[in-house]
């Protein structure tokens, strides 16, 4: 069984730039969720993708967008980066989009620093 | 709205002492609650969930709907329990199942 992988591990950008983060789901999982974890905080839900469509969104502005591909891998795109976007970005995959009892399996995260 | 509160940022206990990590939640529906753990240099991973009513690594957690709590307990702490612990609530936003996390409690077990 292959776990969730994310790339890159670390990334440094400047304000106003755009960034793309990548995630490969665990084998057999069709649902991907993205979370932002600021320093000293718990992860916050950004959005979820199921079968290539956005399936739900947290309280994040439209400059946070995503994609899911037919192989269920996913991208998180952030436009017009702000200093407050500096955080650890986590991807989690699961086998169900709506069953709240299903376990979400997390990747190691991408550490984004915005200067 | 759903919210999870973990009142302690740090809990320091001696090896062999009992551990209780507190978690309170706010949710209008029927909650699904989880404890996730992050060991040093490792990814976030599920420790246990209330629906399974299981004990993992000696940890248990009971859902108390009256007190809206889901505290994590272990009778005898071990050094290897030192980690960051997050309580999480699973609820639906539209058609998506999302996790709402608390701010986490760092457990430090000392000799």
Image (cartoon, rainbow, N blue to C red):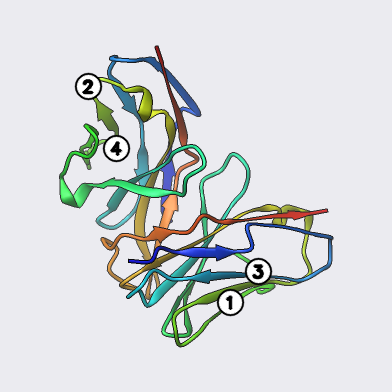
The quadrant holding residue B37 is top left
Instruction: Establish whether labels 3 and 2 are both on one chain.
Output: no
C-beta proximity under 8 Å, tags 1 and 4 = no
Residues under labels 3 and 2: Cα distance?
A: 44 Å
Say few, some or many: other residues with alpha carbon within 10 Å of mark 2 (under 14 / 14 to 19 / 20 or more). few
Q: Chain of mark 2?
A: B
Instruction: Establish whether labels 2 and 1 are both on one chain.
Output: no
Instruction: Residue at 84% x, 60% y: name it.
Output: A14
Label for residue A7?
none
Instruction: Establish whether labels 1 and 4 are both on one chain.
Output: no
Where residue B25 appears, x then y in whole percent?
36, 43
On screen, residue B39 versus residue B18, left or right, reads right
Instruction: Residue at 16% x, 43% y: name it.
Output: B54
Instruction: Residue at 39% x, 74% y: name it.
Output: A31
Residue topped by disc 4: B69
Residue topped by disc 2: B75
Where residue B29 appears, x then y in whole percent?
28, 58
Q: Chain of mark 4?
A: B
Q: Chain of mark 3?
A: A
Residue topped by disc 3: A61
Q: Secondary structure at mark 1?
A: strand
Instruction: Establish whether labels 4 and 2 are both on one chain.
Output: yes
Residues under labels 1 and 4: Cα distance?
A: 34 Å
Label for residue A66?
1
Which mark is nearer the camera, 4 or 2?
Answer: 2
């Amino acid at each position: 069984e292959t776990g969730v992988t994310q790339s890159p591990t670390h990334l440094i950008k400047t304000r106003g730039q755009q960034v793309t983060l990548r995630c490969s789901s665990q084998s057999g999982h069709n649902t991907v969720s993205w979370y932002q974890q600021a320093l000293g905080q718990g992860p916050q839900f950004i959005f979820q993708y199921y079968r290539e469509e956005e399936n739900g969104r947290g309280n994040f502005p439209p400059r946070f967008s995503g994609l899911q591909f037919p192989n269920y891998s996913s991208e998180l795109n952030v436009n017009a980066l702000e200093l407050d976007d500096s955080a650890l970005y986590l991807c989690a995959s699961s086998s169900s989009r709506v069953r709240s009892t299903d376990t979400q399996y997390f990747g190691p995260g991408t550490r984004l620093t915005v200067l | 709205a759903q919210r999870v509160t973990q009142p302690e940022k740090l809990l320091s206990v001696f090896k062999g002492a009992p551990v209780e990590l507190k978690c309170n939640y706010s949710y209008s529906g029927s909650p699904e609650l989880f404890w996730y753990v992050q060991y040093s240099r490792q990814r976030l991973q599920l420790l246990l969930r209330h629906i399974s009513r299981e004990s993992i690594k000696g940890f248990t957690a009971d859902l108390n709907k009256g007190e809206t709590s889901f505290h994590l307990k272990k009778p005898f702490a071990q050094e290897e329990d030192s980690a960051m612990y997050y309580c999480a609530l699973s609820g639906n936003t539209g058609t998506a199942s999302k996790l709402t996390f608390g701010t986490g409690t760092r457990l430090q077990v000392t000799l």
